[in-house]
Image (tube, rainbow, N blue to C red):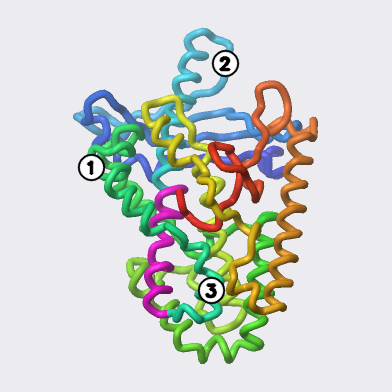
Amino acid sequence: MTAIKQKKLFVLDYHDLLLPYVSKVRQLKGTTLYGSRTLFFLTPDGTLRPVAIELTRPLMDGKPQWREVFTPTSHATGCWLWRLAKAHVLAHDSGVHQLVSHWLRTHCCTEPYIIAANRQLSAMHPIYKLLHPHFRYTMEINALARGYLINADGVIESCFSPGKYSIELSSVAYDQLWQFDLQALPNDLINSLKEWVTDYVNHYYKDSSLVQSDQELQAWWAEVRNVGHGDKRDAAGWPELKTTDDLIQIITTIVWVTSGHHAACFPSQMQATKVMAVLDVLSNHSSDEEYLGENAEPAWKEDPIINAAFERFNGRLKEIEGTIDARNQDMKLKNRNGAGVLPYELLKPFSKSGVTGQGVPYSISI
């Protein structure tokens, strides 16, 4: 109870999402699956330690439901069972990371924003100009993914635990878990993004009446919600787009998903499997990559007020980069400093070309 009151217990819960697929996946050759829940304890040195894993197999093939909780132990057999339980959780986490956190929440859910923007917003519209760099190459990369990565018997189906049910599981996660206003949780980088978006929006929309009377803007948001995300049009979490604050929240969420969220998801996925060669290519920053806040768009430079706001944004990103470097050198932070521990660099804003494990591109371009 003390650990709960002190908020030191965390749960990684893949039970309800995976359990309906256990019997299906177990019918595939050479694979298995459980529903899983993992309990972590926040240690005094700031690291998370797994303390219990629950694996569940539903009623199937005439056998009753099976559920077992595994904990760390020094007993020889128990030690190996604990390792196997952790291996199952790692497989679950890898699959959900790729299918939900990465493909669903960034690549897939961004498409309606792009399509609606190109249908409803003039290229001269200030919000189109703000969003444009965040949509660079996303439709092209998604088309390639559908042909070579998420296709039937493709890389994703052959390398991740749900197998041929991978994209079906991703669709179920969208139906059960996705909500627009939960896609951008506060942190240092998103706070700086919000300041930049706020400066930009407030320059063009002095009061909320201008937001409400902007027919292109309202048509764009209506298409995003009612057509692009039509299955979720009546779900909770959709801003109404009646005020400047609504517009700031909407744009901040979209630019975060296309930049910071995607940067945190994908370049870290180097795996020691046959998918490694593919991930090496897709984690590679090209020499012409455009990074968040590095260079202003030509349209932004035309307005001295917007250009000044961008320069402030660029300065804040450099401060964030320094903060990340300082944390990585802090010996007290055992999760990012010490023997055998990789520093956390995924959200360092800028990067060189190549596979660097850092850099936040404007868009979902890899």
User: Which residue type carries mark 2?
Assistant: Thr
Q: Do the CB atoms of the residues marked 1 and 3 lie less than 8 Å apart?
A: no
Task: Answer above or below: position of 239 versus 349.
Answer: below
Prevalent SS, magenta region: helix
- Nearer to us: label 2 or label 3: 3
Disc 1: which residue: 152
Q: Which residues are magenta?
A: 101-120
Question: Is-magenta flag for residue 105?
Answer: yes
Nearer-the-camera pick, 287 or 44: 287
- Nearer to us: label 1 or label 2: 1
Nearer-the-camera pick, 47 or 50: 47
Nearer-the-camera pick, 228 or 278: 278
Residue 118 position, x and y percent, is 40, 74
| Numbered mark located on residue 129 in the image | 3
Earlier in the chain: of badge 2 and badge 3, it is 2
Nearer-the-camera pick, 204 or 66: 204
Left or right, 22 with respect to 189, comes to left
Task: Answer above or below: position of 133 versus 78.
Answer: below
Q: CA distance from mark 2 to mark 3?
A: 58 Å
* Kind of element beneath mark 3: helix
| Numbered mark located on residue 50 in the image | none
Residue 337 position, x and y percent, is 73, 30
